[in-house]
Amino acid sequence: MRRPLLVLLLAGLSACGEPPPPPPAAPLPGVRTVPLAAVIEHPLRQAPARVAARRHARLAAEVVGTVAAVPVRAGQRVAAGTPLVKLDCPDVADALAQAEAALDAARVQAERAAAAAARAQRLHDRGALADELLDDRRAAAEAAAAERRAREAAWRRAQRDRARCDVRAPFAGVVLDTPVRVGDRVTPGTALLELLDTDSLQVEAELPASLRASLAGAAAVHFVHRDGRHRLRLASLAEALDARTLTVAARLDFVDPPPPAGTLGRLEWQEPQAMVGPSWLSERDGRLGLLWLDGDTVAFTPLPQALPGRAAAVDLPPDTPLIGDGRHGLAPGDRVRRLD
């Protein structure tokens, strides 16, 4: 009986000398992923806007005179060339008469000088006139011709001044205001009438510089106001920033029938750049970006333009598996276990 006990005792001592087995490996952290395409956003962008006319004329007097007639009224639609204000301009009429008389005299003098030069040339050809006298006649003819041209220019200026006494519509439109009345005395710069081209309406907007590229790339833009919604087409977008307002000017043409000039509203369009919401952003090494799964390894893509609490632009492939649940505490390069 003692021998078996001794064998058992020796076997126990031998087992106590072996190293313990290694502990089981810790399980990899589990994560769930979502394809980037499932969380992409295209936020609605907005900017204040108003309907305005491409042509809006504030007509002012260009000569001294008295208002003789205002044959139009506010709200009236007029065609291009329609008389709007008639001025009585006696000084302009006198200046035109004087210019016409001076031009007539200059023409007569030029004709006489030219005839004298022609006679002198004939006499010179027969040897009956000295070279010096021929030169004098030619110089007199040239001076007379120059005087005639000067008088013609003065006459044309007087004619233009006379035309300014009859103010006509430079384009078809609607009369907005007629601040003068018959009998009013006007001088150059006096406001006479305001005219709006209602056939060339467009939308004007001033938007933050940060939205310039967004509007330029928008597939569809609308003007939204209290009474409706209208499709627009981008006409122009300023390159330069307004230093006073820190905005850029945008002009858009209507695709749909426009509302009246002066209507206030807003531009609306969908952001063309793919964006992710702020809840998907993670901060690593002081940079905001996205954690995603590359096989079973955590990858991190920083988004340089990302700001805390705001959606951020992203250019990763749409099928990129973003890490959702379980991403907190992960670092780039960590191995994980995918649960989805």
Image (cartoon, helix red, strand yellow):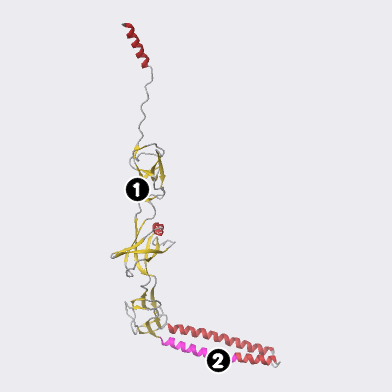
Q: Nearer the viewer, mark 1 or mark 2?
A: 1
Visible residue check, residue 308: no
Quadrant containing the C terminus in the rendered view: top left
Say whether disc 1 or disc 2 marks the residue closer to the N-terminus: 1
Q: Is residue 288 above or below residue 253?
A: above
Q: Are marks 1 and 2 in contact (CB under 8 Å)?
A: no
What residue do we see at 46% from left, 83% from top? 160
* Label 1 – label 2 distance at C-alpha: 91 Å
Of 333 and 143, the residue lying toward us: 333
Report the number of numbered marks: 2
Task: Using a 10 Å C-alpha cutoff, classify the residue at mark 1 as few (fewer than 14 neighbours), some (14 to 19) or many (20 or more).
Answer: few
The quarter holding residue 298 reads: top left
Disc 1 marks which amino acid? Ala
User: What segment carries the magenta color?
Assistant: 89-113
Q: Position of residue 281 (x, y in %)?
A: 36, 46
**Viewer-closest of 245 and 47:** 47
Residue at mark 1: 38
* Location of residue 22 in the rendering, given as x and y in whole percent from the top left corner: 37, 25
